[in-house]
Image (cartoon, rainbow, N blue to C red):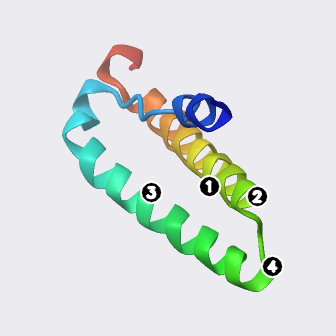
Amino acid sequence: MATCDKESALRGLDLPGEFEDLSGLIETDIRAVVSALTQRAGERLLLTRRESRQLRANLWNGLTEAINQAVEPLSADRR
């Protein structure tokens, strides 16, 4: 059950309307970056499955949060 809870805790992109059409592309890029970093860390640090899942979630959430915060001020509503 903990795995499902962690997966549901993944943050999504919350892009302003002007950038909504890019969400699929950005999510694909985030997925690739998270996958590469998690794989490399797993190989080099011999992470357990739990540690790998936690790293993957932390990376995903950190990257989506950074993108959301960076583009939020670019919304026409906020200008």
- From the viewer's side, name the closer residue of 54 and 33: 54
Which of the labelled discs sits on residue 45, or is there none?
A: 4
Looking at the rendered image, the quarter that the C terminus falls into is top left
- The structure residue drawn at horizontal position 62% and vertical position 55%, both measured from the top left corner, is 56
Q: Is residue 1 above or below residue 64?
A: above
Residue type at mark 1: give it. Arg
Nearest to N terminus: mark 3 or mark 1: 3
Task: Name the mark on residue 56.
Answer: 1
In the foreground, 42 or 76: 42
Crowd tier of the residue under label 2, counting other residues whose Cα lies within 10 Å: few below 14, some 14–19, many 20 or above: some
Q: Nearer the viewer, mark 1 or mark 2?
A: 2
Gap in Å between the C-alphas at discs 1 and 2? 8 Å
**Sooner in the amino-acid sequence: mark 1 or mark 2:** 2
Q: CA distance from mark 4 to mark 2?
A: 10 Å
Decide if residue 62 is on the left or right side of residue 75.
Answer: right
Indicate which disc, 4 or 2, sits on the residue closer to the N terminus. Answer: 4
Q: Left or right: 11 with respect to 42?
A: left
Indicate the quadrant containing the N terminus: top left, top right, bottom left or bottom right.
top right
| Residue identified by numbered label 3 | 30
**Separation of marks 1 and 4 at Cα, in angstroms:** 14 Å
Query: In the rendered view, would you say 54 is above or below 52?
Result: above
Residue on which disc 2 sits: 51
Tell me, yes or no, whether the two marked residues, 4 and 2, touch with CB atoms within 8 Å: yes
